Amino acid sequence: MTSPSTLTTVVHCNLPDSIETGRTLGDDILKAFGGRAPQAVILFVSPRYDVKALAAALTERCTPEALVGCSSAGEFTHEIQNQGYACAIAICSNEMSFTAGIGHRLSEDRERAADEVLKSVTARQLVPSAYSSALVLTDALAGHADELIEALTLRTGGNYQFFGGGAGDDANFKSTQVICGTEVSSDAVVVLEILSSKPIGIGVRHGWTRASDLMRVTESAGPLLASLNGIPAVEVFREHAARTSQKFDEKDPLPFFLHNILGIQTSGGYKLRVPLAVGSDGTVGCAAEVPVGSIVCIMATDAESAQEAAVHATRDALEQLQGHKPKVALFFDCVATRLRLGKNFGIELDGLRQTLGSVPFAGCNTYGQIARVDGQFSGFHNCTAVVCVFPE
């Protein structure tokens, strides 16, 4: 009897000690693989842990060829959903190869960071016929994530599909970390190149709909939004709150903003941006850049739409497998979605479970989501479900 060409396992742990948690994850991976070291491990770690110590302990235990991951803002698998966990997907495959790389000083120079990370992960030239994908995990607090994805796309000639997200720290927005092997860094990006003889499916949906007139961004600086149609940004949100009979407390605006985010109009749909804070000068600070001249509107959604987005993203990913059976899945969604839905965030995961059936999955809540896939709206997003499905 021949062994399967692809082995995967999903593991999780919430022991109080970082080293013991890393060792337990590594032991569970080895047990699932019959003592065989994994080719790749994708790791998501609650910021309550010492991320570096945990990654080192896992590496020492199961010696993966490639390890990437990040600190997170809520962790989940097909079995658990909570904060304060570490979880991972491990893969061994005769059908796939994996290479990890890291780029530093992201906030200073996205072009240089892209060059640095790609020095380690341009193996596609050795296997030109392979399906080429890359998981991208970035310190979103360093900013300029859209520029980073554009730089990676240009440098790889548009031959890769990218997916992933921004590292988190349980909605504290102070410091996030990415993992490459035993190196743990802030202000950095990690990439896991995945070359496969079979297609890998990626789906991207958000479930938000337009809830205001379209407006032009007339003044902004990166994520700081100053005016729309020449009107101070905060005044636009005040008027929308009054028109829709919602409470808008400018000293504590996040409860309102989580239900009233911005959509940037693109040719493929609306790219979402979450407002976070109101400045004393009437500016609105957002979770990512809102370019001057872009056309935007205020967006609305509900819990059922969030679940439908996860379901449709999963179906899209499954269809891209071109008839191959799914083996394991990765799922990313925004910390803002978790904060908005609270306990109801579980309905998104329920939709994922129902659509995937017996296929296991793992993932985390991120500070923004990354997707660059043909036929789907691409770039750096907020409040968007991103699903990646690996074939058997």
Image: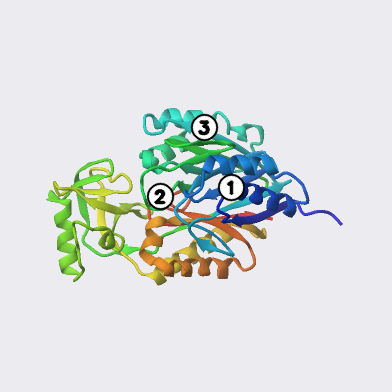
The one nearer the camera, 119 or 32, is 32
- 1 and 2 marks in contact (CB < 8 Å): no
The residue beneath circle 2 is 367
Rendered position, 344 above or below 158? below
Within the image, what quadrant is residue 338 found in?
Answer: bottom left
> What's under tag 3, amino acid-wise?
Val
User: Image check: 13 left or right of 306?
Assistant: right
Q: Position of residue 197 (x, y in %)?
A: 68, 46
Query: As shown in the figure, which amino acid type bears the numbered disc 2?
Result: Tyr
Which residue type carries mark 1?
A: Ile
Considering the numbered disc 3 on the image, is that residue within a helix, a strand or a loop? helix
**Residue at horizontal 48 percent and vertical 68 percent from the top:** 346
Say what secondary structure mark 1 lies in: strand
Q: Quadrant of residue 187?
A: top left
- The answer to whether residue 337 is above or below residue 231 is below
**As drawn, which residue projects farthest toward the front?**
17
Q: Nearer the viewer, mark 1 or mark 3?
A: 1
Tell me residue 51's x, y (percent). Answer: 52, 43
Whichever of labels 1 and 2 marks the residue nearer the N terminus, that label is 1
Q: In front of the other: label 3 or label 2?
A: 2
Q: Is residue 89 left or right of residue 35?
A: left
